[in-house]
Amino acid sequence: MSSTLTRPAPEGAVREAVVPRRRTRIFALPEARWAAASLVLFLVALPLYLLGAPAWAWGPLFALTYATGGWEPGWAGLRALRDKTLDVDLLMVVAALGAAAIGQVLDGALLIVIFATSGALEAIATARTADSVRGLLDLAPATATRLSGDGGEESVPTARLRVGDTILVRPGERIGADGRVLEGASEVDQATITGEPLPVPREAGDEVFAGTLNGTGALRVKVERDPSDSVIARIVSMVEEASETKAPTQLFIEKVEQRYSLGMVAATLSLFVLPLVFGAGLQSTLLRAMTFMIVASPCAVVLATMPPLLSAIANAGRHGVLVKSAVVMERLGQVDAVALDKTGTLTEGTPRVTDIRPLTGSSSSEGDLLRLAAAAEHPSEHPLARAVVDAARTRDLQIPPVEDFSSTPGTGVTATVAGRTIAVGSPARLLDGPDHPAVAVAAGLAEDGRTAVLVVADGTPVGVLGIADRLREDAAATTAALGRLTGATPLLVTGDNPRAAARLATEVGITDVRAGLLPQDKAAAVRKLEEAGRKVLVVGDGVNDAPALAAAHTGIAMGRAGSDLALETADAVVVRDELATIPTVIALSRRARRLVVQNLLIAALFITGLVIWDLVGDLPLPLGVAGHEGSTVIVGLNGLRLLADSAWRRARTGTDR
């Protein structure tokens, strides 16, 4: 809780705790600039083309669309070709140019825009993730106050701290290195590392971590780890490593792009070269080859895949779930195991008063007890104090003014309220012995996972308050729904203490509980499941969840209280913190995957029929284009079915599996 400072924090100490995040601007990325230019040009040219304007009006615009949107994927395809690899980027550019060569300018431009936009979104996602990892390093302060042997103080860069150094951490400062407290007492907010919802008392002999926020007491800390090996540095390393080593992800159709690309190019060249060798005319041969390229081009296949996934993304977005890419939407449907964080995910992440227990023999009612505690806590900025004051205000209790307020870190606060001396704080510190009745009450609350706060009036204990992080209303229902979807009950992975974790797990129906975990332990638990062949979804909100989010098959972050790193590392974000949307978006993803398969079958049927007709018969170009465009329209409309709100409702109720 708050304390009276004998030495104020230096100016700017608290400001140092919050460092502006370095964020790459979207249009600083060349892929984004070229894709945006291509899209704008296409949208300007499209109405002119459809309204029958002369070619000189829309022709240059489409040409610029090809140039701006096609040179990036085309160049990437040429680089791949130099490495003896033929990828779909080059194939798309060639198909677009082929379409333009026989008058299908609109088809080619649409292909170019689709691929340019896809490449830009991938570049943006990569840059944002890199920003968030770099921003994590800003949690640790740039400088620390190092103490010399004669008691002198020296401000040094934290990178120059060495094991054995002693640093002074003033109130409101972030701790500069992992170490152990030598002197002083305070309460440290360790949520970035452990995910604990409340600041924890720290005194001589206790371990502290770099990047965590000191409360209102001064600490002398002996450095026990080199800054490059601190917990916060290891989190950065784990996120980067997991991002780099995570298995490459592709959309379903991209897994066969090499063979399809090679086959299509080889077939087109054969249709052009072989007839010429045997004396066929150039114009008719070129027309047949271009017709083949058009009907065999993967326009319908591309649209078979993207509209269902993009429609599902748009639908999820309207209902508060931001899915970052089509690949992520596809992967969500593959999940068969779920790991849930506790604080800020299953719970709200904010302490609330859950129990008000006047002691036997005390004349105080629940309202009197809460009013006295709130009055004494009112000047304090500690999270527990705010919980007590908020509870009193929720009950419309009048909070009287106080005098002579003071506090001691790790013990509690003392104040004079209406002529009575009120102390509020830790039962272990405020009680003289273990035999007082308040001890049993506090122990019972602790067994239930509550934090017990004792209220003492004029030296006599009058009651105990129980404070806990409140469970989200939809936590139990969400856990059950995830279990039904995956066939296995989710597991709980948390840095909180085992007792609090077990209590919450019982409330939501979870039987597999992993408590007291540091970030690397969470990531290790996820990797173990992945190694066993499970496709794990991790749901979390804090910096300490980021390594697990990065290591998982798919990661979802809670949006409102989520840290920047968690939000950027995760594959999807629950914007309004509605847990119930998570099983819904998984069910929607599975529906999208089924529609993709349907569309691929439709596209394959059309392509196969048109190709056979062109090879063994005489397929007129207009009919080939009509068949090709018809298949494209059919699969596109089929995929757009997931835009409807009814698709979300069916996914939510489980009637559309």
Image (tube, helix red, strand yellow):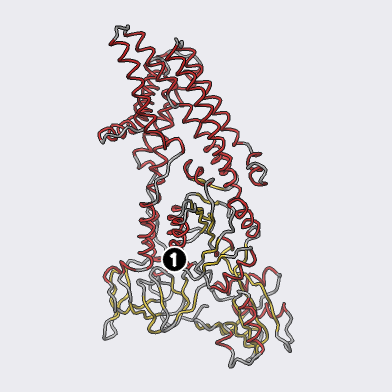
Measured as percent of width and height from the top left, residue 384 is found at 57, 74
Reading the image, the residue beneath label 1 is 521
Residue at 47% from the left image edge and 42% from the top image edge: 327
Picture coordinates of residue 166, whole percent (x, y): 31, 79
Mark 1 lies on a secondary structure that is helix
| Horizontal side of residue 642 vs 622, given as left or right | right
- In the image, residue 40 above or below residue 361: above
Disc tally is 1
Q: Is residue 371 visible?
A: yes
Mark 1 neighbour class, 10 Å CA radius: few under 14, some 14 to 19, many 20 or more: some
> Which of 387 and 611 lies nearest the eye of the viewer?
611
Residue 588 pos. (x, y %): 59, 43
The C terminus: image quadrant:
top right
Front residue of 290/534: it is 534
Along the viewing direction, whichever of 521 and 392 lies nearer the viewer: 521
Taking 559 as reference, is 366 above or below it? below
Residue 578 in sight in this render? no
Q: In front: 74, or 158? A: 74
| Residue 269 in the image: above or below residue 327 | above
Q: Is residue 26 left or right of residue 599?
A: left
Q: What residue type is disc 1 on? A: Asp
- For this view, does 19 lie left or right of residue 361? left
Residue 425 rendering spot, x and y as whole percentages: 57, 82
Q: Quadrant of residue 14?
A: bottom left
Q: Quadrant of residue 500?
A: bottom right
Left or right, 591 with respect to 9, comes to right
